[in-house]
Structure formats: C-alpha cells, structure tokens
Image: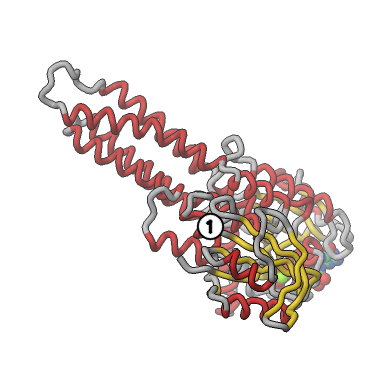
C-alpha cells in the first residue's frame, strides 16, 4: 500500500496549514523530517522540520497508529505555518522520502475500504465539508453519525430473514415437515417493507433542500419588478433593472442563507407572448425554473390591472406578492378574491421585503422538515438505489400473488437487498465508488 500525502486545509495563505500522510511510511517520514525517534499516539509534539541541515519550518507533528486513525492506516499530520511555499516544500520532502501525492478523496476512500466509514458516511463527510448553512451542517452531521445507515440496516434485516426462510424451503423442498410458505404473511411483510422504502423516497426533496438549499423562483409578467425584488431579497445589485419591459432574459442565480436556511434565489424573464426569439427562449427558461422550484414568488404590479398570467405550472409552494405599493393601487385588485391575502410591498423602496423573506424561510423550513425522524436521502444515487429496491419488492409481491416458484421470489428479494447494500456501500461496483470519491477535494 502506498503512503499518500496532501494538504488537508485550503490552498490559500492562512495562519496554519495541515499536511496529512496516510499509509505504512507516514510515521517514519515525519520522524525523519522532525528528527525524532517516535511519535506517541495522538500526541502533539512541537518539532523543527529539516531536510539535512535546512530548516523547512517549525510546527506540530502528531501520529496515529493503525487502526486507530481516520483512514485505519498509520497517519501523521503536520501543522505548520499556512504558507504555500512552506507547504510545497514540505510535501516535496515527503515525496522524496517515499510518499506520493494523494488523489481527490483518497483519504476518505481508504477510511471506507478499512471499514472506518460506510459509503453513506463518506458522502456525509463530503457534505459536511461543503456545508454552507446551518441546515446542511446538521443534516450532514446526522448522516455522518450513521442515522441513515442504521435506518437502512433496520430495513435490510427483515429482508435477509425472508430470503433465508425462502432458501431453506427451496433447499429442502422434498422434506414434508417444512410447511408451504405462509403466503399472506409473506405478502404483509413485503408490503410493509415497500411502504417504508417509499416513505424514505419521500424524504429526498427535504434532504436535498437541507444540504443544497431551496430553489426560490421569481415569476411574473414583464415589468412587475421581479429583478428589483430579486436584488432586494438577496441583498446584492445583481440583476439589471429597467423601465422597459423584457429586460431580463437569462435566469440569474444568487445563493444566500437567511436565518441559516440555504436559499438559491432565481430571477427570470417576464412572461408574455413575445416575437423576439431570445425573449421566447427566456420565457421557456423561466417556466422550466418555476416547474423545478421549491418556492415560487408570483409577483404582480399592484399599480396596474392584473396581467392575466396563468398560475405557475409547478408543485412548489406559491407565494403571491403585489409590488409597487408606493404607487396608487389599481381598482382591478379589489375584485381578485385569490389575491386578497397576497403580501404587498415596494421592492424599489425596500418596504415590507423582510416579511416576504421570512415567509420564504418558513416555507423552506416546512419543506425541509419532510424527514423520517432525522433520516433523509440526499443524493440522486440514494434515490436510484431505493427505487431499485422498491421495484424489486413490487416484482416479488407479484410473484407471490401469481404463485410463481419460490426461486423467482427469492431472486427478487435478493435484488432488493443488493440495492440496499449498494446504498450503504457493503457491495459496490468500482465505477460507483470512483464517482463518489472523485467528487471529493484533494486532502479529504
Ligand atoms: N414605483 C415603483 N417602481 C418599481 C418598483 N419595483 C420596480 N419598479 C420599477 O419597475 C420597472 C421594472 O422593474 P424590473 O425589476 O426591471 O422588472 P422585471 O419584472 O424584472 O421586468 P422584466 O425583466 O422586464 O421582466 C423599473 O423601472 C423599476 O424601477 C416599486 O416597488 N415601485
Ligand atoms: Mg427583470
């Protein structure tokens, strides 16, 4: 096994930098640089790091003996001044002493291979490192603690029992004392399992929102003031504003974290029947964004009659908002029963924008709440695996009803168990592993 080395902190000038090594030569390499004969387990030592007579830097060295380390191998860490020149020189010295540069995610991959983390926990670690708001931190930390892994283990064990039961009957088909399978009882077990897995699938959008934030889309007719409101909501002068309708064509995105809730605000083109092909393309983008949104802010100009825009085609939570309250209201709005509860504000004067922001945060919090206990799926990989398991259980159910041979039933149940095993990483094809770990950064 190679010994790998990488900068574990960000490659920018900083107070401190941490260089990490993992593998059989880690401790020897650091002892050589530090001119010490031993690194007691998990104890920091202040050392001078030298190559021959040349001083590279002074700092702290710490060693962890296998298997009591992050990767399960011998690990050494050097805490030095956060200078890129120091770090480059130090890593070069480690390479001269027999280490090689680590690939992205290689430390985590070794931790996974040595059973320190399952695949879900390795992903959670990556999510924790990239978490940009409180909601993501909490979700990632729970998954790192293994809540999702435990929930899956609880679903997997009745499945394994059912498979074992079927296999025993298949093996001893000629033994009369082994009664026929209790088909109604088996059917109940399978229905129950499939229901639990479907409930887990239902957590995927909450999981995504907690980690990656909610998509909040501004929707409305040209000139309603979407871009003005967008700039005000995200506190940045990002989108162009103009008195002429049809200003915005491309979608514009900004991410912020009001009250610790991660939100991607998306400004879109005003919706009208346009002849201009660019504006038409912009309209298509706006409609697509609204369709995939978690929250839609439907904005109308209260100083003019209703635009007659149809409601957004979206399953999202829709917040109706009337803009330009600094101008006299058009009497048309008195007849619009479904707009009586709309929030009224002036984007331009930044008046009553905060209640809208609070309403968005509340809507996002509600959507992020759709977890089972604290368990939520968070990646497309998770959703695909659970869908595969559910489909296999549905096939098994059908095989049971049609009184197909037990072998077929057992094969379907094994497919379901395999899908769950791929999810936790108990059994994983190499390409899945590569896809998971290559998305990590170097030094993780
Ligand atoms: N009086 C007043 N004018 C506003 C308000 N909000 C926006 N406006 C003005 O309305 C015009 C259109 O604003 P935009 O923000 O560009 O409108 P939009 O909905 O993004 O327009 P498109 O990009 O063309 O779809 C500009 O002249 C703004 O200054 C408001 O609260 N009060
Ligand atoms: Mg605009």
Secondary structure beneath dot 1 equals loop
* Residue 287 to residue 384: above or below: below
The residue sitting at 70% across, 70% down in the picture is 34
The residue sitting at 81% across, 52% down in the picture is 344
Q: Which sits in the foreground, 237 or 98?
A: 98
- Please tell me in which quarter of the rendered image ligand 2 is found: bottom right
Q: Which sits in the foreground, 240 or 55?
A: 55
Question: What percent of the width, then of the height, locates residue 88?
Answer: 67, 80
Q: Residue furthest top?
A: 177
Q: Residue furthest left?
A: 174
The residue sitting at 58% across, 70% down in the picture is 5
Question: What percent of the width, then of the height, locates residue 349?
Answer: 89, 63
User: Dividing the image into 4 quarters, which one contains the C terminus?
Assistant: bottom right
Kindly indicate the quadrant of the structure image that contains residue 266. Answer: bottom right
* Residue 200 to residue 64: above or below: above
Residue 48 as seen in the image, left or right of residue 401: right
- Report which residue position mark 1 lands on: 73
The residue sitting at 54% across, 71% down in the picture is 102
Q: Which sits in the foreground, 105 or 229?
A: 105
Residue 437 as seen in the image, left or right of residue 163: right
User: Dividing the image into 4 quarters, which one contains the N terminus?
Assistant: bottom left
Q: Residues within 10 Å of mark 1 (few under 14, many from 20)?
A: many
Question: What percent of the width, then of the height, locates residue 430?
Answer: 38, 61
Residue 40 as seen in the image, left or right of residue 404: right
């Amino acid at each position: 096994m190679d010994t790998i080395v990488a900068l574990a902190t960000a490659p920018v000038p900083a107070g401190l930098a941490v260089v990490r090594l993992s593998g059989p030569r880690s401790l020897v390499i650091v002892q050589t640089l530090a001119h010490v004969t031993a690194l007691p387990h998990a104890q920091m030592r202040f050392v001078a790091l030298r190559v021959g007579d040349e001083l590279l830097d002074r700092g702290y060295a710490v060693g962890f003996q296998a298997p009591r380390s992050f990767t399960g191998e011998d690990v050494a860490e050097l805490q030095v001044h956060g200078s890129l020149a120091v770090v480059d020189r130090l890593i070069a010295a480690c390479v001269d002493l027999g280490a090689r540069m680590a690939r992205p995610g290689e430390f985590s991959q070794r931790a996974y291979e040595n059973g320190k983390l399952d695949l879900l926990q390795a992903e959670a670690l990556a999510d924790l490192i990239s978490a940009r708001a409180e909601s993501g931190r909490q979700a990632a930390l729970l998954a790192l603690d293994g809540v999702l892994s435990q929930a899956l283990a609880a679903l997997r064990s009745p499945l394994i029992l059912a498979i074992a039961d079927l296999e025993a009957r298949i093996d001893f088909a000629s033994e009369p004392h082994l009664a026929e399978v209790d088909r109604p009882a088996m059917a109940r077990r399978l229905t129950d399992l499939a229901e639990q897995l479907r409930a887990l699938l239902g957590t995927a959008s909450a999981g995504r929102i907690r980690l990656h934030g909610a998509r909040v889309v501004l929707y409305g007719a040209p000139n309603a003031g979407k871009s003005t409101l967008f700039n005000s909501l995200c506190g940045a002068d990002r989108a162009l504003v103009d008195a002429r309708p049809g200003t915005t064509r491309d979608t514009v995105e900004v991410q912020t974290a009001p009250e610790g809730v991660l939100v991607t605000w998306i400004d879109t083109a005003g919706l009208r029947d346009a002849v201009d092909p660019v504006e038409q393309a912009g309209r298509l983008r706006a409609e697509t964004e609204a369709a995939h949104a978690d929250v839609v802010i439907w904005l109308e100009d209260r100083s003019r009659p209703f635009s007659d825009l149809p409601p957004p085609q979206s399953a999202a939570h829709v917040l109706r908002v009337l803009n330009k309250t600094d101008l006299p209201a058009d009497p048309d709005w008195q007849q619009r029963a479904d707009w009586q509860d709309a929030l009224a504000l002036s984007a331009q004067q930044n008046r009553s924008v905060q209640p809208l922001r609070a309403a968005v945060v509340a809507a996002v919090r509600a959507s992020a709440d759709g977890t089972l206990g604290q368990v939520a799926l968070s990646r497309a990989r998770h959703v695909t695996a659970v869908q595969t398991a559910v489909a296999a259980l549905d096939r098994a159910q059908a095989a049971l009803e049609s009184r197909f041979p037990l072998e077929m039933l057992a094969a379907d149940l094994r497919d379901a168990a395999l899908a769950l095993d791929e999810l936790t990483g108990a059994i994983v094809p190499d390409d899945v592993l590569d896809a998971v770990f290559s998305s990590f950064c170097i030094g993780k």
